[in-house]
Image (tube, rainbow, N blue to C red):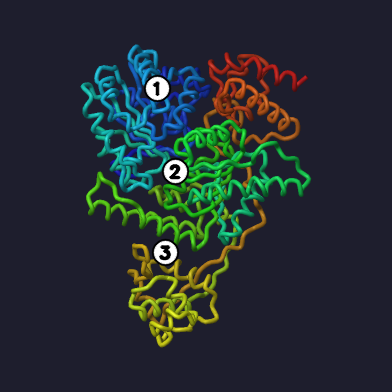
Amino acid sequence: MTGFEAHAHASQPDAAHYGSQAALAALREHFGYESFRPGQAELIEAIASNRDVLGVMPTGSGKSVCYQIPALLLHGITIVISPLISLMRDQVDGANEIGIPAAFINTTQTMDEQEQVLDAAYAGKVKLLYVAPERLETPRFRNFAARADIALIAVDEAHCVSQWGQDFRSSYLGIGEFIASLPDRPTVAAFTATATERVRRDIVQLLGLRDPLVLVTGFDRTNLYFDMLKLNTREKANWIANYVAEHADESGIVYCATRKETEALAQTLNTLVPQLRAARGAGNAPGDVAVAYHGGMPAPTREQAQRDFVTDRTPVVVATNAFGMGIDKSNVRFVIHHNMPESIESYYQEAGRAGRDGEPSRCTLLWNESDIVTRRRLLDMGGPNERLTADEQDLVRRSKRQLLDGMIGYCRTTECLHRYMTRYFGEHDTPGTGHCAGGCVNCASTFATMDVTPVARAISMCVHDLGQHFGMGKIVAVLRGSKAQDVLARGFDRLPTYATLEGTSEAQIRDVLNQMVADGFLYIGEGRLPLVQFGPRAAETASPTFHYEIKKTERKAARTAPRTQHSAYGTGGAGAPVGSFTPGGDGEALFERLRALRLEIARDIGKPPYIVFSDKALRDMAQRRPHTSEEFLEVNGVGANKLERYGARFLAAINEFSD
């Protein structure tokens, strides 16, 4: 912890310690919870006191509560700046469902519809107004903002403002100027799940936050099981198809690096999964198993794909990273990465789409050496940014290389994956705390070391022989004694290192070389044909005492994430945490009955099922089995609005099941 920040720790403090009774009353009435999660009350209290804030909180930890409750308590309007217009409808629906008047303005509306929303906001009929950052630059919106009573501006996904972050968006650079242009400056609240200390400082500076409370609640997601598997590219689709077939009743996201891969993999899943389920004697639901989603699709097709996924019509979406930022779907039980992401920030954010409701969920990363090559190539192909100078663009490119190195390190590490990730974000171990509460493949595996000293030494010598002027492919060719015309024409067959690793597989040479890059012995340069050069530790490989080992994972047989106890919203002292309850016997049957009712209601009202109730709320219902309205209000996630809208139908279903 630095003087710049305040950290909230994971222990659940006494609710009475926090803030006003009005905030707690709003939490109970609208959200149906008895106490705040760590960090929420401090942020709400600061905002209510007109102090700027920066909240860094894990995905699924309730960031939206931190600006929705102030929106209810403060005068005037709260403007929420959100990066993707495709998600605004769900965010607005969710707020309206719990009794918070909300609306959005985006390009899906006509000019007349936008005018109606602005008039309603100006008249005080809207408390939450969602807009994209580009909207702030339009004269029409600026005129509205200059005369409206704006109490709070909430910036969601605030890391997008920083050129050092993994998801920099130039449109975010205009937010600070917009705030400064307002005749009466409102309180500003920025929120993100992924921000190193450097990015946090950028957010404060570029948004012009004034003496902000910077609060980091911790990055670990203890309900997530982190898995990682090194697979050849051709094996990945089969692995994913088998996983989806075994988890047919679960909702999941599969991320791919390219648009082409998303469409091909979705088609493969729709062919293979029904065959696998039929071979196992399992039934198959009608319709496609998977739908593709990427930025190159026509907007109506893309929106329909998202709608099919969030409404549970299609259980799996196969997507590029264009999908997911701010996704509110709470019952995603697994996220699989078909390719290695570009950074820990990207992976943390995308994997964090799983288990937003706090229920046990699984995050699996499939990777291989060619993923590293692809990522480096995509990074070097990045286009220019008109808001940055050439020197600044060069710094950004170098920064992204460092981010990629962190991701490669994650793939290769043998330590706890939870610990690797939290330490990356600057969160250091607290004495006496346990690790890997959600579980990870490294903690569930054993490792065998393999001495690759001769291979590493030969690679280093070959880089020297080639004058640091060639890429990985040429190094492998020389070491394995290739007879290719290009190798012989250049006279490489006369180099001292030619054919010194003739009996070593190309895969192992590449594996060791990439590990040497990760460990600082070598460096891979930029450009269309990246050169392998010496890193800061290169001289060590020439020492007679040089010794180099890599570790091989020996995985245990377990393939599914264990259900674990974990903290969530407080239960007000009413028994064990919801997340520790796993319904069995007729409890599981009741849970499934409630899920079916939720889907029926969601389709009747044209909203995603999680807007009605989360899986966590349904599990609590299955455990508590309320029979009266008063008992129904005690269920986690049930507020007055939801009792009025859905209470009668759910109580009838529970009573019928019990009878």
Q: Position of residue 400 (x, y in %)?
A: 35, 54
The residue at which mark 1 appears reads as 110
Check disc 2 and report its element: helix, strand or loop. loop
In this rendered view, identify the residue nearer to me: 356 or 495.
Answer: 495
Q: Position of residue 457 (x, y in %)?
A: 43, 78
- Tell me which residue sits at (58%, 43%) in the image: 334
- Tell me which residue sits at (49%, 73%) in the image: 509
Q: Residues within 10 Å of mark 2 (few under 14, many from 20)?
A: many
The dot on residue 365 is: none
- Residue 565 appears in the figure: no
**Viewer-nearest of labels 2 and 3?**
3
Q: Is residue 422 above or below residue 595?
A: below
Check disc 1 and report its element: helix, strand or loop. loop
The residue at which mark 2 appears reads as 219
Q: Residues within 10 Å of mark 1 (few under 14, many from 20)?
A: few
Horizontal side of residue 608 vs 194, given as left or right:
right
**Marks 3 and 1, how far apart at CA:** 52 Å
Check disc 3 and report its element: helix, strand or loop. helix
Question: Residue 40 is drawn in which quadrant?
Answer: top left
**Viewer-nearest of labels 3 and 1?**
1
Residue type at tag 2: Phe
The dot on residue 518 is: 3
Residue type at tag 3: Ala
- Tell me which residue sits at (54%, 70%) in the image: 449
